[in-house]
Image (cartoon, rainbow, N blue to C red):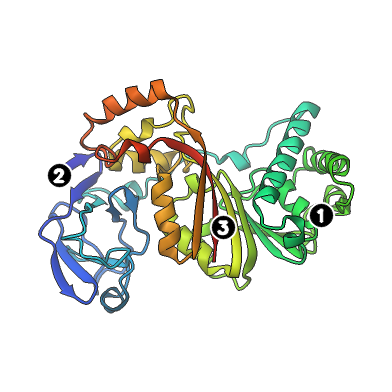
Amino acid sequence: MCSHQGDFRLFELADIHHDSGYCWVTKLPDDIIVGESEDNDEKSKLILFEDNIGFCQGSALHDSIRNFGNGLFSHWGDDLYFSTPDNSSPITNGRKYYVAAPMKGKSAKDAKRISGNTPVNYNWYSFDESKVTLDAEYAVNIAFNYLNAIPSGKSFIKGKSILELGPGINFATALIMRSWGARSVTVADRFLADFNENYHPKLYREVANILTTLDSESDVSILLECAKNGYKEELINLLESPLEELQEIEQKFDITLSNAVFEHLYNPRIASKVLYSIMESGAIGIHQVDFRDHRDFSRPLEFLLIDEIEFVRMFDARLGECGNRVRPYQLEQLFFGAGFSSVKYDSNMNVEPEYFNDFLSRLSFEQSSCYSNISPDKLRSVSGLFVVTK
């Protein structure tokens, strides 16, 4: 398969040859911008895919690719040196490998695909009391959902370090964990929301009121302190960073939490490995994932019909808010591949049968989609809870 789309070219790898160790090499088309070299230290914009999942380990040393593999690759001159994520042979493992790369004659600015959109977390509106109440109830509900999935509940939380990923516009759920005895809580988000005097004080006081009614043993002074003085370091740690870039932090966590985050990650393969690396031995992760096409929840699988390069463009333009298309079975494989000893998935939403039948009939004609030959059973679940243990 080979196609031209705008300033990027999508090209399925062919004529792959074994280099040595875990490294494989193939020559890239002449019309793709040349990669890095001794005379060119500009990072390549090439994206390498295995089936529909992009790699994020480019610019690797060739000896590292040969000796370690695990998805490392290098766009060097006109050649691609690469390894597969599981170090299997790309010739015999039955998977497809292809690249999306800018074509010659296009500027570096064009290749970056810069978006002018504003992230949801940075869009502030006026909040009335009903909005505050709804947000408070939602945060408390999420906290109890986490609690129900954690073995031993609050007794397990006490004295633990907790990381919540992608908390959204408020950090109430993480603060509730402090109220339940967590030693420390950290929130991390690619687009971290600032403290808003017109919203957060009201919200945290409302959460404290709800929590006192539901659980009189909760220490709501944590929430009230945040309402009064904002995000003090002794109450909560803030990291403006995506999960994919958290490998450099020194702290490790006993519990990791997320709600509707993994479907927005730019590189779920790297994110899964980073998640494993920042968790303590014996730590547990509770991650609710919404696998639907976020452009229209009533048609939750539509983005699976889009070819890869068009989807890469759309995902970037929407800052990942449409969803990354990774399916439950793929995310399960990524968690196991990252090293987790236990990965459990509990589906809590399936596609509506009438829509599903119509979608499958259309998917069968979209041979450019990586999902056209996937078993329908692997596409049926569109939401579920992962519990992973290191």
Q: Which mark's residue is nearer the viewer, 3 or 1?
A: 1
Spatial distance from mark 3 to mark 2, Cα to Cα? Answer: 36 Å
Which residue is tagged 1? 179
Question: Which residue is drawn at the image coordinates 85% and 46% (left, top)?
Answer: 215
The Cα–Cα distance between marks 3 and 1, rounded to whole angstroms, is: 25 Å
Three-letter residue code for mark 1: Ser
- Along the horizontal axis of the image, is 251 left or right of 270? right
Amino acid type shown at disc 3: Ser
Q: Earlier in the sequence, mark 3 or mark 1?
A: 1
Q: Earlier in the sequence, mark 1 or mark 2?
A: 2
Which is nearer the eye, 44 or 179? 179
What x and y, as percent, mark residue 25?
17, 67
x, y percentage for residue 323?
45, 40
Q: Nearer the viewer, residue 150 or 73?
A: 150
Q: Is residue 267 visible?
A: no
Give me the disc on residue 241. 3
Eye-nearest disc, 3 or 2: 2
Residue type at numbered disc 2: Met
Give the side of residue 158 with respect to residue 166, left or right: right
Residues at marks 3 and 2 touching, judged by CB atoms closer than 8 Å: no
Q: Nearer the viewer, residue 279 or 110?
A: 279
Q: Which residue is mark 2?
A: 1
Near mark 1 (Cα within 10 A), the count class, few <14, some 14-19 or many ≥20, is: many
